[in-house]
Image (cartoon, rainbow, N blue to C red):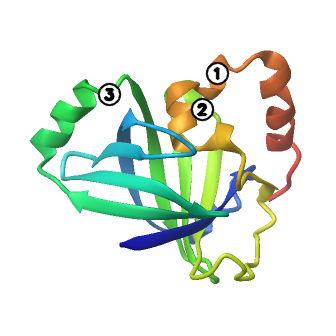
């Protein structure tokens, strides 16, 4: 069993682009999603790879994570049964202090860009780049499962606007 420990940040600007090592388009759907219990996700990466992932709370910012490669055809069939879905372009970044990825959301979750860093321990220090303008760790509304259920575009303006203000206030 793997333990996932990550911190998440809202990103503004393009300062992250020089750090991109790889990119892939992800589609994911949720068959079950709960912040307090099991989350069951199916994910495809382009037309090549697919995974089934189970996550359970482990306390604090840690979650137990079980991830299994599955046939692409199975993933596509499961996606047909998941009413809550999202798509994003994921970029692996060459930043120190953990395993960094950055998600550029498309569709109803645009213009959100969220960076995540996976850590070895919850108290591990990390140098946060200046283009990470607001920490989202622990804010359930920004979890992928929550964004699939309630996309950013569907948020009431009074909830969405303060976050959009963060996106315009950074210089690269």
Measured as percent of width and height from the top left, residue 71 is found at: 11, 50
Q: State the residue at coordinates (76%, 69%).
A: 129
Residues at discs 2 and 1 in contact (Cβ within 8 Å): yes
Relative to the observer, which residue lies in front, 55 or 71? 55
**Res 91 label:** none
Label ID, residue 82 = 3
Up the image or down, 8 lies above or below 113; here it is below
Whole-angstrom CA distance, mark 2 to mark 1, is 8 Å
Q: Badge 2 is on which residue?
A: 110
Q: Quadrant of the N terminus?
A: bottom left
- Within 10 angstroms of label 2, few (less than 14), some, or many (20 or more) residues? some
Residue ID for mark 1? 153
Residue 77 left/right relative to 149: left
Locate residue 146: give its quadrant.
Answer: top right
3D distance between C-alphas at marks 2 and 3: 20 Å
Expressed as whole percent of the image width and height from the top left, the position of residue 68 reads 24, 60
Residue located at (21% from left, 34% from top): 78
- Is 24 on the left-hand or right-hand side of 161? left
Q: Earlier in the sequence, mark 2 or mark 3?
A: 3
Is 78 on the left or on the right of 132, as rendered?
left
- For discs 2 and 3, the disc positioned in front in the rendered view: 3
Q: Secondary structure at mark 1?
A: helix
Screen quadrant of the C terminus: bottom right
Image quadrant in which you'd find residue 154: top right
Between 98 and 83, the one nearer to me in the picture: 83
Asked if marks 2 and 3 touch (Cβ < 8 Å), the reply is: no
């Amino acid at each position: 069993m793997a333990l996932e420990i990550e911190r998440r940040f809202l990103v503004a600007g393009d300062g992250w682009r020089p750090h991109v090592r790889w990119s892939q388009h992800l589609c994911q759907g949720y068959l079950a999603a709960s912040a307090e219990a099991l989350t069951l996700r199916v994910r495809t990466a382009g037309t090549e790879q697919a995974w089934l992932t189970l996550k359970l709370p482990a306390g604090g910012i840690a979650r137990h994570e079980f991830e299994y490669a599955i046939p692409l055809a199975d993933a596509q069939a499961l996606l047909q049964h998941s009413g809550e879905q999202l798509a994003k372009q994921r970029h692996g970044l060459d930043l120190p202090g953990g395993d960094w990825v950055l998600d550029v959301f498309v569709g109803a979750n645009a213009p959100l860009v969220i960076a995540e860093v996976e850590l070895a321990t919850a108290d591990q220090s990390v140098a946060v780049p200046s283009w990470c303008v607001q920490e989202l760790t622990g804010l359930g509304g920004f979890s992928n499962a929550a964004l699939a259920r309630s996309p950013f575009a569907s948020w009431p303006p009074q909830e969405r606007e303060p976050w959009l203000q963060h996106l315009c206030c950074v210089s690269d």
